[in-house]
Amino acid sequence: MDGPSPTTDPLRNEFGSLNDLAHELASLQDLALRGSWRSILDKVSRARSLDLLSKPHDHLIYLSYNVLALTKLRRFTDASAEIDSLHDFNSHQYKYESYPQLYPSRSGSMVPFSLRFIHAQLPFKLENRQEGLDRFYLLLSFIRQKIKEKGSNSFQESIKIWRKRENFVLHCLIGHHLGAKDFIVCLDLIRDLIDHDYLDPVLISKLGYIQMQVGDIEGAKGSFHRVETMFNEGKNDGYSSLSEVEFRNLVNRNKALIYLVGKDYVSAVREYEECIERDHTDVVAVNNKALCLMYLRDLSDSIKVLENSLERVPTVALNETLVINLCSMYELAHVNHSEIKRTLSNWIAGVAPDDFDASCTRA
Amino acid sequence: MSTAPQGSHSLAFRVMRLCKPSFHVEPPFRLDPADLFVGEDNFDDPLAAANLPPLLSTQLSKSMDSSNLTYGNRFHLHHPSDAMGFSGLLLLPQSFGAIYLGETFCSYISINNSSNVEVRDIIIKAEIQTERQRILLLDTSKSPVESIRAGGRYDFIVEHDVKELGAHTLVCTALYIDNDGERKYLPQFFKFVVANPLSVRTKETTYLEACIENHTKTNLYMDQVEFEPAPHWSATVLKPDELHPADSSSTGEIFKPPILIRSGGGIHNYLYQLKFASPDSAQMKVEGTNILGKLQITWRKNLGEPGRLQTQQILGAPISRKEIELQILEIPSLINLDKSFSVHLNLTNYTDRELGPFEVWLSKDSVHEEKNVMINGLQIMALPQVGAFGSSDFHLNLIATKLGIQKISGVTVFDTIEKKTFDPLPDMEIFVESD
């Protein structure tokens, strides 16, 4: 190496801000956080046509945002086509060392890992579940291979990141198997994680939800009891770091579910109210409390609970499931429910991000 | 599902089936910033490894801060298990769904006054009408609802244990006085069909194998399946060895794998060993019906929604009056092609009188199968009488005309006096070797 280069100049921190990582990344990120996915498509298109992206990694990051935006807008075929345009993630043209002038001291893949994930998940949205599963399991072996390689080079931070990705993919797989009702596979995958000392109270709670979904109430109680013990013993593994409020609410919500299943809706409501008192943005508690009120024959209050949360904390409460529940309640409470649903739709249109699926109002 | 009432009414019924809600699950497209802002191998670089994490965590906490009014929760992962898309959010039942025998039908019923005038003295009734009966679920005749204001509602929840198959109708009626002082009658009908959730097939020797098949559209969790034997029997359930042996590992305490029967035709078999409850019940073998007992099945669906059924009495094979029994005692271990071999048989007389004399032969009942094993010599063997409760040993000389696995089939016994042919012996396999 001759002369000071950007990477060794102590006066220039290559990682000071988002814009150091990629061209106008801060702006892309800001749009993404607001859910302005259409604006992202515009920005990427503009950057490409005006040739503003000078480096290979800029192109890849912009492509990632573009693919993500298309996915969020439910344009799955377009997203798939764009990813496929890369042909092969492992190609040398996506490696840092192929451009020694641009990345003098760097080697390895510059492909953002998100692209691999989106590539695996898209087939599910294109009615090709088997392809999706195959891609996820292949991705899992790819990750495990990477962990081995990094291990032999002792890249500690890198290993940490890849292990995080391993857990991420495992969780995705559990979700997909759950969606397809492959309950035994889900239970086995979770059991595997727990047996390897991945003791995340949220995961163990979700194990309980799966047991409950299946009908194994005693099993669910066992799982929830374990979570409560972890809370009482102050245990919280390194992976998940729940805040105290989050942990308490988790325990309360688990209790509420047991009451709900036993048809003791009054006690369930009480547990959820404790959660909401502690954290009014606990949307799961809000939504589920509303359902319990309905099972208690109090349709009016169940509607109020959901409407209030939308008004009070829209960016947290606005999700498709909550809206579907609210609309089901409207349909029951009003003979002529189209008007009230239209009011809701209009309000949503003014507030929702681009990726919100408005068809959930059935208006 | 509802038939519209005729004439104009201020009131209308709205009905929603209240089976248990379900958990919403949908794996989302949510990412970790580290997987988006930089290349996947970026962290190999020690500079990146040191400087990126703080930048990333600032980004993450910014996105999760609800006071920021962003939709970061739809974009970034707050917690690793967010990737599952299974937060514990419950979803109300979105359709009536299927309903099965043994379940409990539960419904939210709302009577709405969609007019702009008040109605008074409302007598509300809800009944279930089936082919056989009419079951009253709710009746406010003794204390009518005083009034329902314009735009108001009166709600109730009804429950009914479903015990009949076929067409059911939920009949909701309201008798009320409208604003003109007129007495009005509003009937509304909601139809549904109750189907059979399971079929149980049994097979028995001294073991009872019950095969339960799931005809519903959801998986069923077998909460309890118990065989209640008839008085003179005792039953023990036979279970296979555990795939993951019970250990003291972390998961061993949490759960044992549930028994789940897949929807739409999945099956699960249960095996029971039946024994006579006491030595003297052996004498109770009554000719004709042989009642073994009943199966009690309790299942759970979504969020523990229960259902239960009991089978009819399960019958064992009718006890034939076994008069004689023919058994093969011994077959030589080496059987050569085209060489005569001797099979040792025994005939036992279970009656209290002398039977026989008998004839024994190999029947030619299977038309399409060649007989590769035949009697060597006289095709019919004569056996003398066998005394009451006695038995007699004899040998059959057989010869095999083909190599490999062959069958000794159709060994038949004929009582020459009573002119009775007994069922042939079940096929016996032998291996024929060359010389």
Image: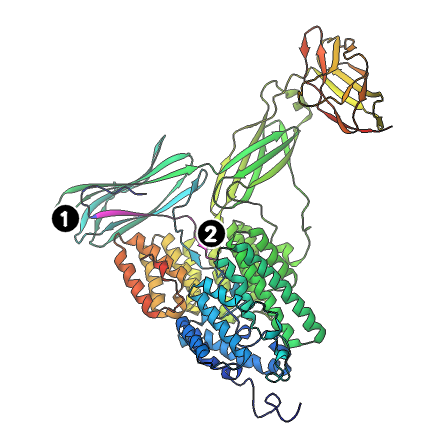
Amino acid, disc 2: Val
Q: Does the segment drawn in magenta span residue B209?
A: no
Q: Main secondary structure of the magenta part?
A: strand
Give the quarter of the figure containing the C terminus of chain B: top right
A50 left or right of B144?
A: right
Q: What is the magenta range? A: B11-25
Please provide percent x and percent y for residue B26. 48, 59
Q: Is residue B388 visible?
A: no
Please provide percent x and percent y for residue A228. 55, 62
Q: Is residue B62 above or below residue A319?
A: below
Amino acid, disc 1: Asn
Q: Is residue A82 visible?
A: yes
Q: Which residue is pictured at 69% across the width and 23% down the height?
A: B369
Q: Is residue A281 above or below residue B26?
A: below
Q: Is residue A186 above or below residue A65?
A: above
Quarter holding residue B288: top right
Q: Which mark is residue A103?
A: none
Q: Which residue is mark 1?
A: B179
Q: Does the segment drawn in magenta span residue B20?
A: yes
Please provide percent x and percent y for residue A145. 67, 67
Label 1 resides on the chain identified as B
Q: Residues within 10 Å of mark 1 (few under 14, many from 20)?
A: few
Q: Is residue B45 above or below residue B163?
A: below
Q: Which residue is mark 2?
A: A261
Please provide percent x and percent y for residue B240. 67, 42
- What colour scheme does the image use? rainbow
Real-space Cα distance between discs 2 and 1? 43 Å
